[in-house]
Amino acid sequence: MLFMAGCTRSDERAAIPNKDRNVLHLFNWNNYISTETIRRFEKSCDCRLSQDYYSDNEEMLAKLAAGASGYDLIVPTSNAMDTLIRQGALKPLDKSLLPNLKNIDPSYLDTPFDPGNKYSVPYAYTISLLGFNQEKIKELGLPTDTWAIIFEPRYLEKIKGRVTVLDSQRELMAAALKYLGYSINDADEKHWKEAADLIVRAKPYWAAFSNTSYIKELATGNLWVAHGYSNDMFQAALDAKKTGRSFTIGYSTPNEGAVLALDSMVLHRSGKSPDLAHQFVNFMLEGKNSADLTNLLGSGNPNTEAMQYVQPEIAANKAIFPSRESLARLEMLRDLDRKQRRLLSRLWTEIKLR
Amino acid sequence: MKRNNTWLWSAAALVYAFLYIPLAIVVVYSFNDSRLNAEWVGFTLSWYKALFNNAEMLTAAGNSLIIALSASFSATVLGTMAGLAIHRYNLKVLPVLVFTPVAMPEILLGVSLLLFFLQVLNLTLGMVSIIIAHTTFCIGFVAIIVRARLQDMDESLFEAARDLGASPWQTFRLVTLPLIMPAVVAGALMSFTLSIDDFVITFFTKGVGEPILPIQIYTMIKVAVTPEVNAISTLLMLLTLVMIIIAAKLDAHASSRDAKTSS
Amino acid sequence: MSKGDLREGRVARLLVGGPPFIFLLIFFVGPSLIMILTSFRFPGEFGGLAPIAAPAASAESEHGFTPEAYQFFFSDLLYGEIFFKSFAMAAATTFICLILAYPLAVLIARSEKRFRNLLVLLVVLPFASNFLIRIYAWMIILGPESALSQFINAILGVFGIGPVTLLFSPFAVLVGMVYVHLPFMVLPLYTNLEKHDPALLNAAQDLGANGWQRFWQITWPLSLPGVFSGSALVFIPVLGMFAVPDILGGTGDILIGNLIKDQFLGTRDWPFGSALSIMLTLAVLSVAALATWLARPATGQQG
């Protein structure tokens, strides 16, 4: 029994007591659904939405890989969903219960890791891009439409110690690979080495690897350029505006292309209320409910019906809602196999230590 | 002696300042009328209001208190026993069992306990699994402190008690326990703070559908550090303070009674 | 000792040592065995672990047991380097904690009895607040616009030394580490110092020993058990810590804790993560054994 650890054939353990029959268990990011939306859903289904939170896809994957069960719905990002599908951890969707699926923009359907959307329904997306202090960057005469600003010493020397990049092996490598003209999913060891060299060369100019603190540091003016997620940049720009800064925070997707992180709703095999789960997915596909999230977080929205409810200044933001040609340059991360993961991990350790 | 004391007081005051300056920032910004923990904008209680309207957060705080109190209680009892046993009897295996969990990275303890609960014990995850997990990593901390207290303790005290015909239990109750009490209290306090704030082990050993405070806070911070978190932290400290003062009052009452009977 | 005493001793030993022994045997040794086994397995293709028995028709090509994770560890000096760096950081943290904690512990131990618990409580209280939020507070204190940064740079400026950045540096990591672990040093020190008989110090003073001599010849040697326990409680947890270097560290601040975390929450390489942890635990235990061995003559004298 002990040796099942890796397989994640979730056994149907732990019968949920009766009083919990009308509870939908959602394993989600914190603050990734507005309280208004929850209230409306609970009213419409006469049930209770109970959420458990993770702060990183990997936490969720590790917990499920060890055999944790009882979650009806999960909201993984593309590459984590890739993993869950390949592990056989998900329940196929019953499309007849999801009439609102028609609301989703077809460019976000039929992804390479879930052809035909057998398991997943897009929820929201973010783009990994560049956020910057607009006035400062203009004053220094630096470009904002290319990854060169975080990789090329000739630009970096003007902003030394005022730059952070994401503390994520995949994200940072993806940016470097894109800058070098490769795909973010390129797994050629030679290309990886090239990307690692690029990173090591630029590293002395960066202040830190940062996954969250750049939001505040940008908004306070301590940082001038940050590699980060579009919804975080939205937040930073909002914060800077609200506190009446003398500068503004801009953000844009580099021309070389970037990572598109599409979060989707999927049903875990161990879920006890698949009917309720479908009801929730269909509910979230309604334009208004889907728009709530975008208005709350500034996340991208794959739902065409939602656009009429999205605040106009968000809807007009090209860094949040990319144009067709910009969208074509975005890629979603695929999962790596175990050998590649170990190799990348060693490269990453080396990068950090050098 | 006096001059020595001034020196000591100023050194200690500096260390207390080191401990409390970050804390002052946490508390002050919990009243700040800006989402950004960056500069003072204006006074507000809105973060506290938001907190008290957040049912999930309040449930989480309640759950976490129950867990922290249970885990620190069981860790203190077991850890004190372990510390005594290691000191008194020349044990070989117990010290290793007690001290290795302290040396084990929490992520490893979290994942391995989760595997163990699910795959070996077939346990349903819930409050109990969290309490067990927290107890496991707190025992060592208590035992190490208790043992440090017992070392070089005058053994003649225990012998005298025995010679006077005290049973082992009486010796423990009337001689040993009062002597090691500061260590027991310190161990309990340490376990409580370790438990109430642990994210990694709690994340892995918690069950479905019960909010736990550190999980709420950590996953929230990953998205953004809002003053709401400062407000929770402030309240938590206040609550801890109140609880400990009540415990101290009760204890002072009991010990003054003890002192009277024993003198 | 009579026969009856012996038997009583054995019963007491069982009663006192038994419960923690059994609890840890189940809830610590059990999980640890799983992890030791894990370190000898293959990581699963998509995370978790590869099966032990050969799969019939699955994507998992490798199965069974392997020393691969350990070979990987020794295949590169990289990991040894991180171990060394982490132990140096742990030693520095322990040393600074000791220097900061000692006067505090002495003060608490010598203060009036009714104040003692309050003073101890004041040490622990900040730790009832959230860990991360305290670290973020240090980001504010060490940030480039903070009063501290500007003060230090103003002083350095007088000597013509260019401005230094405090945040995102090994220094910031050290400050964070010391801050987080300080109570673990204060508490054992205090509980040890509290039992010392002040009469000893007075006697020494009567014999003409000055403050310094009294400290080095009486207080310090007597407090060694407290020093050792405190050092263990600081040194060891520092090694597993990843949040402090993550938040306060710069681009080069990676410690063993980060590496282990990465194997579980990043690379999904549980076998290598387990192997790293086992190597770390072994290293810690050998340091502890060495310390005990070195400390033996010192504590023996006071016996």
Image (tube, coloured by chain):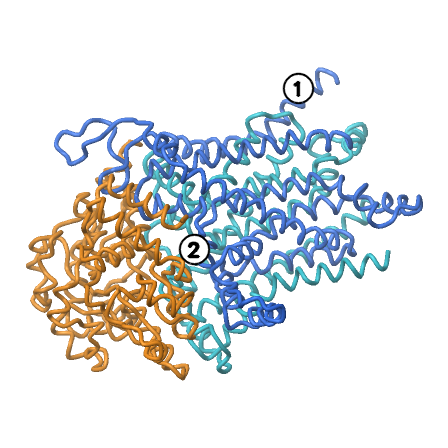
Chain colours: A orange, B cyan, C blue
Q: Earlier in the sequence, mark 1 or mark 2?
A: 1
Give the secondary structure at mark 1.
Answer: helix
Read off the chain for label 2: C
Q: Residue at x 67, y 39 (%)?
A: B148
In the rendered view, tell whether residue A33 sits above or below residue B70. Answer: below
In which quadrant will I find the C terminus of chain C? top right
Going by the image, does C264 lie left or right of B93? left
Q: Position of residue C95 (x, y in %)?
A: 63, 47
| Residue nearest the viewer, comparing B7 with C50 | B7
Chain containing mark 1: C
What's the residue at 54%, 58% (across, down)?
C128
Mark 1: amino acid: Arg
Residue C7's disc number:
1
Name which residue lies at 40% across and 30% down. C33
> In the drawing, what numbered circle is on residue C246?
2
- In the image, taking residue C255 as reference, residue C114 lies left or right, namely right
Res A51 visible: yes
Front-lying residue, A307 or B214: A307
User: Which is more foreground, mark 1 or mark 2?
Assistant: 2
Q: Position of residue B157 (x, y in %)?
A: 79, 34
Element under disc 2: helix
The residue positioned farthest toward the top in the image shown: C3
Q: Are marks 1 and 2 on the same chain?
A: yes
On the question of residue B233 being in view, the answer is no
